[in-house]
Image: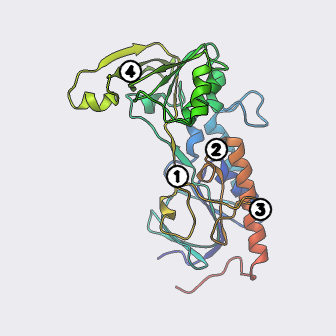
Amino acid sequence: MPDRQIHDLVVVGSGVAGLSAAVYAARADLEPVVLEGDEPGGQLTLTTDVENFLGFPEGVGGMELVQRGREQAERFGAEFQRATVADAALDDRPFELELSDGETLRTHALVVATGAGARWVGAEREERLMGYGLSTCATCDGAFHRENDVLVVGGGDSAMEEALFLAKFADSVTVVHRRDELRASEIMADRARDEEAIQFRWNTELVELHGDQETGLNGASLVTHPEGHPKEKLEAGEDVERETVDVQGVFYAVGHVPNTAFLEDTPVELSQNGHVVTDSETTATTVDGVFAAGDVADARYRQAITAAGTGSMAALDAESWLDSTVEMPAQEVVNA
């Protein structure tokens, strides 16, 4: 039988944003329920070393940072549940969340902190080497590649930004793009072209990564076709040029996909790219009582420290909203 208790707050997501929201909400005695999702901890668990999170001068492992956050939230009374949201009814309050395990949660307020997943390209060994030389965030991992040779996969503004940032550290940065022209804006493309450390490989795609978790990434195999989209040509049986290059880092910059599928049929407004739209000054969404934090609403910064900040903001916004609405029993129970 579904749980008929009405919770004060449910936090969807257990990355840094969700954990930060859980800590603040639990300290406010809101007894939040945190839905961990299929991959507890989110994207940060794929990062072996985090060197730019305040308070860890020697760096900290992504998994360790997440685990510490969970322990902190549990210490103050947050409850964790291993489930995702399959469907959300947000037209009326209390909100109802249908979970992947068949349970239904009812809550007065909701914090969406489900993050965004970086698009991968399907290269061989990418799952094994993610965090071991393969990355989706130059700002996070670029400093590990001082005097290295690295690849950036992509052709949009994000790829140019990644390449320009990496050029501060790496000996060489090669942008690998499957077409013969960039999708990036003219100003970003010009900046990348003007940087001496950045080179371009046109009509080229990444098909395989080399290395292991002990020694790290040490090479990559590329395919090229003069008409572009070489992987499609390869699958169609056409001849392509194959080359293995010596690189110590590969960065994917082919976009991020916000984890907002469960919100698509709700009144919560989403941007054209699927990010949750929030108020310009708060974390409030277009639905009263629903707040968003972290990469699910942030298409620009996508940093652990900014996600933690917006997580705390979302909890404070939720607490303030709960206090300002018609008084509701914190632990109301409805007869089934």
Q: Which amino acid type is marked by label 4?
A: Leu
Looking at marks 3 and 2 on the same chain, the residue that comes earlier in the sequence is marked by 2
Q: Residues within 10 Å of mark 4 (few under 14, many from 20)?
A: many
Looking at marks 1 and 3 on the same chain, the residue that comes earlier in the sequence is marked by 1
Q: Which amino acid type is marked by label 3?
A: Leu
In the image: residue 296, left or right of residue 77: left
Q: Label 3 to label 4, Cα distance in Å?
A: 48 Å
Residue for badge 1: 273
Please name which of the two marks, 1 or 3, marks the residue nearer to the observer.
1
Work out whether residue 43 can be spotted. yes
Looking at marks 2 and 1 on the same chain, the residue that comes earlier in the sequence is marked by 1
Residue for badge 3: 316
- Residue 49 percent across, percent down from the top left: 64, 30
Looking at marks 3 and 4 on the same chain, the residue that comes earlier in the sequence is marked by 4
Q: Which amino acid type is marked by label 2?
A: Arg
Closest to the observer: 84 or 138?
Answer: 138
Residue for badge 2: 300
Q: Label 1 to label 3, Cα distance in Å?
A: 27 Å
Looking at marks 4 and 1 on the same chain, the residue that comes earlier in the sequence is marked by 4
